[in-house]
Image (tube, grey):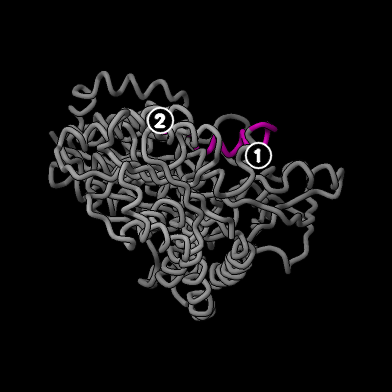
Amino acid sequence: MKEIRILWTDDEIDLLKPHIIFLEQKGYKIDTSTNGSDAIELVKNNSYDIIFLDENMPGLSGLETLSKIKAITPIVPVIMITKSEEENIMDEAIGSKINDYLIKPVNPHQILLAIKKNIDKDRLITQKTTSAYQSAFSRLGMEINDSLSYEDWIEVYKKLTYWELELSVSQDSTMDEVLRMQLNEANNSFAKFIKRNYTEWFKTDNNDKPLISPNLMKETVFPILKENKKVVFLLMDNLRFDQWKGIEPLLSQYYKLESEGLYYSILPTSTQYSRNSIFSGLMPSEINKLYPELWKNDDEEGGKNMYEEEMLKSLMKRYNISGGMHYEKITDIKYCKKITDNINSVLNNNLVAIVVNFVDALSHARTDQKMIREMANTTSAYRAITKSWFEFSPLFEMLKAFAEKDITLIITTDHGSIQVSDPVKIIGDRATTTNLRYKQGRNLNYNKKHVIEILNPPDAYLPKTNISSTYVFAHGTDFFAYPNNYNHYVKYYRDTFQHGGVSMQEMIIPLITLKSKGK
């Protein structure tokens, strides 16, 4: 372990000799000074890991010394030691960015604790996190093997996401590969679960089924509206559960968390299918049948999500939901400001439905633009970029404005995404869909071991473009690649974030209910 070097400045440093000997016996290297001027010179000429600074010294005061030290080395933690607990001194010290303070007389164990809090904290957290995941690894493995229900898989995914987030802030990367292998193992088992159970969810006599896309509005939003309460329904396209956990602390300053749930996206996990299903309250084949003018198949030209507002109005009418609805699809984030500026007018409606495409756009930009691809080269980096964007976005400002009103905020998504790495060869005709995670068409040629098939689309309420249409889905980290120009295709799409297929990250997605704290 790197030797930790400490500077301790106190005009009575001789009286602290026992403390210094104690720390030296613990392996720390201690430099000392008796005044602020000497301390500043030592800081100029040496590199320190932490500085202890007496507040009350002759000559330069502790606060004056602190200011000059921070100008030289702003990052090194400084612990102020003071005889006084006067509020103005503490306010000034904290405002000058001290990392901690201690009240005299101090004992060696207080000093040791301050060192560990400010220097060894990351190392100690890393050790504890690594050890805790090692202990949880076997239990998680058994849970993956024993997961028989959709509730089991929600709990497994929550736990794996928890460890992914914990290990991502660790300084030790030794467990990253272990977690990656466990995630792959879980997704392989999850794919088998979906293969066995997905079409069973649509049988009328089956009550053992999860909340899925077409039931989302009816089960979560409409009950609140029927109580004549206002709901802001925010759908952030392509938002994964781990990305939600990244932005949650930002919103917790303004909203109370009422529930943090997960629900299942329908297949394919793509915007055309899952989002249209949410706003219509129908499965894709039902939309195609009842509203043929609003549905476009994969092989048809034109936008596939052009009629969400019309679908939602029709859904509200079917369930006798009154109170008005304001719908906004935000493809340019600056339009959030328009809503913020007109918030009172917008809230004349009981339901405000907002779709934001940024996360999905980031996913596609990461595929197409080299710079963003390099910035978001891991799930951790992708998550960090999402959080950073959200923190400084007009969307966050808009949600702060809504927090001043008496509303319920529901944040959800239509599907998630997964970082793909393993190509699977498939052959189809010109009418075959272009999505990398699912294919719909006729005469598809593939290795059955590597896909999930839906040979009879009506079983999954999926439309057929012709009588022999079938659907196949990639699972885990697989993605479909054509044999033509195979190597170029694989190199271009490997490690990109894709959706449309079967994985926990794509299908098990956040459903968050928040209550504004109000004025």
Residue 357 falls within the magenta-colored stretch: yes
Instruction: Report the span colored magenta.
Output: 356-371
In the image, what residue type sits under mark 2? Answer: Ser
Identify the image quadrant of the N terminus. bottom right
Q: What secondary structure predominates along the stretch shown in magenta?
A: helix
* Corner quadrant of residue 260: bottom left
Q: Nearer the viewer, residue 97 or 128?
A: 97
Q: Is residue 231 above or below residue 416?
A: above
Residue 236 location (% of width, % of height): 42, 40
Density class for disc 1 (Cα within 10 Å; few <14, some 14-19, many ≥20) is some
Circle 2/circle 1 CB separation < 8 Å: no
According to the picture, the residue beneath numbered tag 2 turns out to be 37
Which residue was labeled with disc 1? Answer: 299
Numbered disc 1: secondary structure? loop
Horizontal side of residue 16 vs 356, given as left or right: left
| Amino acid tagged 1 | Asp
In the rendered view, tell whether residue 458 sits above or below residue 152. Answer: above
- Residue 361: x and y, percent? 55, 34
Q: Position of residue 178 (x, y in %)?
A: 62, 67
Q: Nearer the viewer, mark 2 or mark 1?
A: 2
For the point 19% across and 48% down, which residue is it? Answer: 224
Label located before the other in sequence (2 or 1): 2
Could you say which quadrant of the image residue 402 lies in? top left
Q: Is residue 414 left or right of residue 450?
A: left
Q: CA distance from mark 2 to mark 1?
A: 76 Å
Residue found at x 40% / y 46%: 8
Q: Position of residue 235 (x, y in %)?
A: 39, 40
Give the residue at x 49% y 77%: 135
- Residue furthest front as drawn: 14
